Image: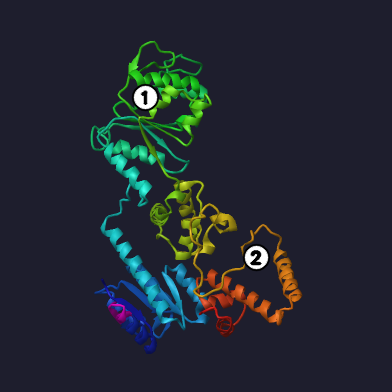
C-alpha cells in the first residue's frame, strides 16, 4: 500500500498525525507546503492526502484542484479551522473526500483516514478489474440462489417463470438466462425479444405476438412478423404475463404445446424455435382461483420458477448496488462519481424501497445530478428518505447509530412530523405538570438540561459528530457546545 501524505505548515499537527498513523501500521510522508506536494507528485503518489487549507506558499484548495486534475480518484481529506468552514464547503465541491475540523480528536482523525484508505483501495481494485459492470449484483443468500439457478439452467432451453415485485430486476434475470444459454452469447447468439403484455392494448396484443397478414384488419397495409417470429432461434420474454387477456392465453398455450401459430388473418401455420421466459408481479395461483388465468397455461409456464426477493429482503446488497449505480450515472453524464457518507448509506439501507432496485437506481441518478457535493450526506437525500416514516418498512434493522454517549431520544422526539408544530410544547407542559405535581425539586434545571441535551444530540447527529458545525447550526459558540457536552455528560 502507498503511504499517507500529510501536508501542514504546523509541525505539531504533522508530528501528531505521523505518530498516530505509524502506530496503526501506516507509512506516512509529511510536507510543510503545497509546492513540495506537487513536486513529489511528479515521481510518486499517495494512497490518501491529508492537507491543511491555509499554508504558506499556496492554498490547500488550489492544491486540491491540481491534485484532482492529476489523480481524480485520490481521496483528499481537508483539515480546516472553524473560520474556514466556507472553504470546507468549497473543498467538498472541489472533490474532497471529507474535512477534518481543527482541533480534532486523534482517534477520530485516524478512523477518517482509515475510511479514506479503504475507499482508495476499493477504487483501485475496481480499476484493476476493468470498467465493465457485472450483469447483476448481490451477496444476499436469496440472490445467490438466483445466480446458482441461472448457472444450472445455462445449458437448458426449459421454460422459466420469474416472479417478484415490480422493480426487482425480472428482465435482467431473463436476459441473463438467455445470454448464458445455448441460444445466447455462449451459443448461436439468437435474439432476445421482450414484450410487456400489460402495456399493449388487448386489440393489438395478438398482432404484436403473432403478427398479421396484409388486410387482416383496418390499417394492416403490409404483412407484419410478430414477436414469436422475431425471436426464432432465441428467447421471447413475456413480461407481466398475469395481465394477458384470457382469450389470448388459449393461443399462447397452443404455441407452447406444439410450437405452431397463425398470423392474424393468416391460414398457413407457422413454427418458431423459441424459448419462452415469462414474468409477473402477481400471484398466479390466486389469478387461477379467480378464473382470470388458465390453469393449464400456468402449469405450462411454471416448469422452473425463480422468485426474485424485494430489496428490503436483501438490504446487505444496497451499498454495493448504490455504488454501482452512482458510478454508472457518473459515466453516463461524464462527471466524477459521487460517494455516500456513512450516515446517508445507513439511511438508504433502512429505507423500505417499495420500487425495489429500479427505485434505488433512479435515486442514484437523481443524486448524481442534484447532490451539491461529491460526498452525499443525509441532508442531500430526497424528501421521501428524510421523512419520519422512511424506515417504517425496516423494523428488523437496528436504530441508526448516533453520537457515542448521547442520551436516547425521548418518545416525544419520535412523533411523526405530521404533528402540529406546537405539539412538543404540549408534551413539555404535560411533563412539567407531572414533575410539579410530584413535588420533584429543581424542575427548571431538570427540564432545561433535557432540552439542551436533546438539541445538541440532534445537531451532532445531523453533522455526524462534528461539534464546530453543530454549534454553528445551533447558533451557539464553539466553547459553549464543548462546555455543554461536558456538563450534560454527552461525551461519556
Q: Look at the image and give the residue range highlighted in magenta.
A: 21-29
Above or below for 323 versus 244: below
Give x and y (percent) for residue 396.
Answer: 49, 55
Could you tell me if residue 401 is visible in this image? yes
Q: Which residue is mark 2?
A: 412
Q: Quick one: which residue is furthest to the top in this view?
A: 267
Q: Quadrant of residue 152?
A: top left
Q: Secondary structure at mark 2?
A: helix
Give x and y (percent) for residue 188.
Answer: 24, 32
Q: Which residue is mark 1?
A: 228
CB-based contact (under 8 Å), mark 1 and mark 2:
no
Which residue corresponds to the image point at 30% horizontal and 58% vertical from the top-left?
126
Task: Tell me, for residue 215, which label it has, or none.
Answer: none
Could you tell me if residue 341 is visible in this image? no
Task: Using a 10 Å C-alpha cutoff, classify the residue at mark 2 as few (fewer than 14 neighbours), some (14 to 19) or many (20 or more).
Answer: few
Q: Image quadrant for the N terminus?
A: bottom left
Q: Quadrant of residue 322?
A: bottom left
Q: Nearer the viewer, residue 119 or 81?
A: 119
In terms of sequence position, does the residue under pointer 1 or pointer 2 come before the other? 1
Which residue corresponds to the image point at 32% horizontal and 67% vertical from the top-left?
71
Q: Secondary structure at mark 1?
A: helix
Amino acid at each position: 500500500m502507498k503511504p499517507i501524505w500529510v501536508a501542514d505548515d504546523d509541525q505539531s499537527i504533522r508530528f501528531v498525525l505521523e505518530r498516530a498513523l505509524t502506530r496503526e501500521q501506516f507509512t506516512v510522508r509529511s510536507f510543510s507546503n503545497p509546492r513540495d506536494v506537487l513536486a513529489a507528485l511528479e515521481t510518486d503518489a499517495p494512497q490518501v492526502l491529508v492537507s491543511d487549507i491555509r499554508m504558506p506558499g499556496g492554498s490547500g484548495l488550489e492544491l486540491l484542484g491540481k491534485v484532482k486534475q492529476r489523480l481524480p480518484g485520490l481521496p483528499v481529506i481537508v483539515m480546516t479551522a472553524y473560520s474556514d468552514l466556507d472553504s470546507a464547503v468549497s473543498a467538498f465541491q472541489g472533490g474532497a473526500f471529507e474535512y477534518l475540523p481543527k482541533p480534532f480528536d486523534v482517534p477520530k482523525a485516524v478512523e477518517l483516514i482509515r475510511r479514506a484508505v479503504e475507499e482508495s483501495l476499493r477504487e483501485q481494485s475496481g480499476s484493476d478489474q476493468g470498467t465493465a459492470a457485472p450483469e447483476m449484483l448481490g451477496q444476499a443468500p436469496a440472490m445467490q440462489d438466483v445466480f446458482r439457478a441461472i448457472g444450472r439452467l445455462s445449458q437448458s432451453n426449459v421454460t422459466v417463470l420469474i416472479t417478484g415485485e415490480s422493480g426487482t430486476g425480472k428482465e435482467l434475470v431473463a436476459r441473463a438466462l438467455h445470454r448464458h444459454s445455448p441460444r445466447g452469447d455462449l451459443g448461436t447468439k439468437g435474439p432476445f425479444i421482450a414484450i410487456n403484455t400489460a402495456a399493449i392494448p388487448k386489440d393489438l396484443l395478438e398482432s404484436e405476438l403473432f403478427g398479421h397478414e396484409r388486410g387482416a384488419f383496418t390499417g394492416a397495409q403490409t404483412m407484419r412478423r410478430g414477436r414469436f417470429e422475431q425471436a426464432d432461434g432465441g428467447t421471447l420474454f413475456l413480461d407481466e404475463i398475469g395481465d394477458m387477456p384470457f382469450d389470448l392465453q388459449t393461443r399462447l398455450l397452443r404455441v407452447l404445446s406444439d410450437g405452431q401459430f397463425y398470423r392474424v388473418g393468416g391460414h398457413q401455420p407457422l413454427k418458431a424455435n423459441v424459448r419462452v421466459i415469462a414474468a409477473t408481479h402477481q400471484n398466479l395461483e390466486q389469478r387461477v382461483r379467480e378464473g382470470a388465468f388458465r390453469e393449464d397455461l400456468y402449469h405450462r409456464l411454471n416448469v422452473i420458477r425463480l422468485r426474485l426477493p424485494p430489496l428490503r429482503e436483501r438490504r446487505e446488497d444496497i451499498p454495493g448496488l448504490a455504488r454501482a449505480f452512482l458510478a454508472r450515472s457518473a459515466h453516463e453524464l461524464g462527471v466524477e462519481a459521487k460517494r455516500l457518507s456513512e450516515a446517508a448509506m445507513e439511511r438508504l439501507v433502512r429505507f423500505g424501497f417499495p420500487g425495489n432496485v429500479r427505485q434505488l437506481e433512479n435515486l442514484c441518478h437523481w443524486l448524481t445530478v442534484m447532490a451539491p457535493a461529491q460526498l452525499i450526506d443525509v441532508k442531500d437525500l430526497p424528501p421521501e428518505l428524510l421523512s419520519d416514516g422512511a424506515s417504517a418498512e425496516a423494523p428488523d434493522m437496528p436504530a441508526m447509530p448516533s453520537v457515542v454517549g448521547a442520551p436516547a431520544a425521548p418518545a416525544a422526539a419520535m412523533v411523526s412530523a405530521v404533528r402540529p408544530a406546537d405539539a412538543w410544547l404540549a408534551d413539555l407542559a404535560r411533563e412539567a405538570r407531572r414533575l410539579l405535581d410530584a413535588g420533584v425539586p429543581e424542575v427548571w434545571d431538570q427540564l432545561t438540561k433535557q432540552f439542551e441535551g436533546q438539541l445538541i444530540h440532534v445537531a451532532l447527529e445531523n453533522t455526524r459528530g462534528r461539534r464546530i458545525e453543530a454549534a454553528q447550526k445551533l447558533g451557539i459558540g464553539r466553547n459553549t457546545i464543548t462546555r455543554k457536552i461536558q456538563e450534560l455528560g454527552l461525551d461519556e
